[in-house]
Image: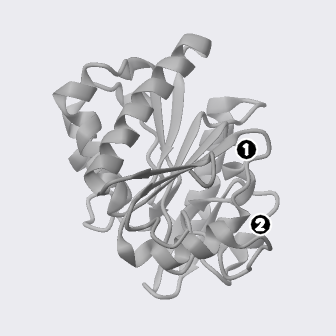
Amino acid sequence: MKNPGITIWKDAEALSIAAAHFFVAECHRCIAKKGKFVVALSGGNTPKRLYQLLGSPDFNCNIPWDNVFLFWSDERFVLHTDADSNYRMVKENLLNYISIPEKNIFATPVNGTAKDCAKEYEQTIHTFFGKKIVFDSVLLGLGNDGHTASLFPGTTIVKEKKKLVKEVWAEEKKTWRISFTLPLINRAAQIIFLVAGKEKAAVVASVINHKKINPAFPSQLVKPEKGTICWMLDEEAAANI
């Protein structure tokens, strides 16, 4: 293994199974330590299979959902019923199959303006955590352009230093998104990049291998202040590292 922060799995299915086992283990570790497991989920295609596995009988029965609290690291600014909604994707693949209290689910607000909803979500996070805001685990993906969450290259959100949640305009899709900022992501006790597919090989190598920060890759700015970072890749995504 080239890097102790990198694990490589045969294919996307093996990666998803490993991530599901990892989720269960971390869930039990955190609950044993402090009584709860607070997670920020990601959208996109790669984690969908992970969510399906967590909702399946083999994994579902091993997760004490009453002590699990779910947030979203970013969200498309559409209704939760919209096909593009990250919340809807998680609901259809996970939430519909588990017994988790409604009060444990903190979906990103999408009613009103994107700016107001970002402020509301940040306040929700402040209220939930109190003074010490530290997610036990933040799950992230990686775009072909080096973005993660909704931290796109060239957008002002990448340079945000104070706000924990902020709205961002996604030019390619011509739509608003709401995203955790780097100050919030980097506070996490654990950050997990889940990346699969040969189309991601070039950007994975660029992000991981560059010793100097490349402003074209916001994902390189994900650096936990006190926590750990883990890259979970399939063989195709890891081909160039």
> Could you tell me residue 170's position as x and y percent?
52, 80
The residue under the point 61% across, 76% down is 206
Q: Secondary structure at mark 1?
A: loop
Neighbours of disc 2 within 10 Å: few (<14), some (14-19), many (20+): some
Amino acid type at mark 1: Arg
Neighbours of disc 1 within 10 Å: few (<14), some (14-19), many (20+): many
Amino acid type at mark 2: Glu
> Could you tell me residue 24's position as x and y percent?
40, 27
Which mark lies nearer to you, 2 or 1? 1
Residue in front for this viewpoint, 105 or 98: 98
Q: Quadrant of the C terminus?
A: bottom right
Please tell me whether residue 5 is drawn above or below residue 141 in the rendered image: above
Task: Provide the residue designation for mark 2.
Answer: 160
Q: CA distance from mark 2 to mark 1?
A: 14 Å
Residue in front for this viewpoint, 117 or 234: 234
Residue 159 seen in the figure: yes
Q: Secondary structure at mark 2?
A: loop
> Could you tell me residue 46's position as x and y percent?
35, 59
The residue under the point 60% across, 41% down is 124
6 sits to left or right of 12: right
208 sits to left or right of 51: right
Please tell me whether residue 204 is drawn above or below residue 216 in the rendered image: above
The residue under the point 48% across, 52% down is 108
Q: Can you tell which mark lies on residue 187?
A: 1
The residue under the point 36% across, 22% down is 65
**Image quadrant in which you'd find residue 115:** bottom right
Q: Can you tell which mark lies on residue 67?
A: none
